Amino acid sequence: MTINKDDILNDLRFKDLSRPEGKILLASPTMHGDEEKYVHEAFESGWVTTAGENITKLEQAVAEYVGVKYAVSLSSGTAALHLATKLAGERLYGQAKPNSGTLAGHKVFCSDVTFDASVNPVAYEDGEAVFLDTEYDTWNMDPKALEKAFEIYPDVKLIVLAHLYGTPGKMEEIKRIADEHGAIIIEDAAESLGAKYKLNGKWVETGALGGYNAISFNGNKIITGSSGGMFLTNSIEDADKVRKWSTQSREAAPWYQHEEIGYNYRMSNIIAGIVRGQMPYLHEHIDRKKEIYERYREAFKNLPVQMNPYDAYRSEPNFWLSCLLVDNEAMCDQVRGENDYLYGHEKGKSCPQEILDALSAFKCEGRPVWKPMHCQPIYRNNAFVTARGNGRGQTNAYIDGVSFDVGADIFRRGVCLPSDNKMTDEQQNFVIEVVKRCFE
Ligand SMILES: Cc1ncc(COP(=O)(O)O)c(C=O)c1O
């Protein structure tokens, strides 16, 4: 039987369910009151611009928290990643002409299962992303794929790595391999502020693990300013360069003098006021997210699903999004086209699209796991490397065998569940019930 989204409410499995009051969201801003105070102060003092006390204080607070020397406030995590990528490009290959990117003619190894904002800056800088497959232990870049990638492309010197959904990747292995090849890491910690990793026996915050690091304060992140991001570094020269580039690259001259391409990427003092007010609550948010994750894990014990995994010995995630992975044997038929999908219900089985339809029918917000970058139309011609080697053209019409693609498998079987800090236990119980009924 194939299911139409509108049929869900009439399906016998769901017919007697009634939804609790209130919004049940994926992840939305949780405000505490201090935010308004700092925004108000900015109005009162007249600093309604891209400078002011909120920015200064926020930069100090974040740098101290993450354990880096310098934090530069920017308009978004994407802007932070762009300038991090440009810095890396300049360091590796020198300054580019105004009409050319710093990575022109060069390949960059990139996380594959992530938001495209992680990797687009490589293209902004005219570089070519090579996507590296994912591992099942943390859903992040597979160090084995990185090793294979260096065998195939030994000249690559730059790696862009994201920590998916707030779960740190295998940084010890990845850093070791990067060091062996003299490669720089750009750490995309947009989703993982507050998550830690035990590197060589010492706890380090994500955002302090790369050569260049970026975080995001986008509206759905663990703390937010409605938008905004930061570049984090221990290098005063890099911090100064990012400040200069982000304010249109003005030289020291009495007039507007430009020797480099500039950007308007600074954060406003109003946004900084919101994030400044959120900072003291980062831990409270993480504790609540962890509680949500553990409630799901407990509730799904007898279902054929696993929660998004992490290394409990070497990492402490921030649990930004709780996700589930449907066991292979419990997957009903599901096909996805470019913009549409179809699935057929089978007793005792389900699939992400059915779960998402059921949640959506009851106005609960879920989301598919990020579709891997190497499967995206825009990056379909880019190279893809798995733990077994070249990930393109893995099958042979004349020989039996299947292709190996962990990221595509996690996308096929994974769902991001409502993980909003303000979700009540009653609301979460309802989400749990909907998911359980999908498998009836
Ligand atoms: C992994 C990842 N990288 C980068 C970004 C971009 O951050 P922003 O939205 O602040 O530009 C996001 C989120 O939006 C993200 O989830």
Image: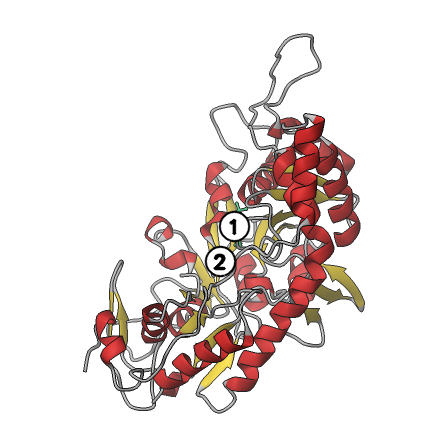
Judged from this view, the residue extending furthest toward the front is: 21
**Which residue carries the number 2 mark?**
114
Query: Measuring 73% from the left and 41% from the top, which residue is drawn there?
Result: 59
Mark 1, Cα crowd under 10 Å, few <14 / some 14-19 / many 20+, is many
Question: Which is more toward the observer, 386 or 285?
Answer: 285
Which numbered disc covers residue 118? 1
Instruction: State yes or no: discs 2 and 1 in contact (Cβ < 8 Å).
Output: yes
Q: Residue type at mark 2?
A: Thr
Position of residue 227 in the picture relative to residue 16 (left or right) = right
Q: Residues within 10 Å of mark 2 (few under 14, many from 20)?
A: many
> Would residue 270 be found to the left or right of residue 313 on screen?
left
Classify the position of the N terminus by image quarter.
Answer: bottom left
Q: Residue at x 53, y 43 (%)?
A: 78
Q: Nearer the viewer, residue 223 or 41?
A: 41
Q: Position of residue 438 (x, y in %)?
A: 35, 83
Q: Nearer the viewer, residue 192 or 158?
A: 192
Q: Position of residue 117 (x, y in %)?
A: 49, 48
Secondary structure of the residue carrying numbered label 1: helix
Q: Label 1 sits on what residue type?
A: Ser
| Res 317 quadrant in image | bottom right
**Mark 2 Cβ and ligand 1 under 8 Å apart:** yes
Residue in the image at 44% along x and 76% along y: 431
Within 8 Å: ligand 1 and the Cβ of disc 1? yes
Where in the figure is residue 229, as x and y percent of width and height?
A: 60, 44
Residue shown at 37%/67% (left/top)? Answer: 363
Report the side of 435 relative to 214 (left or right): left
Residue 205 position, x and y percent, is 73, 58
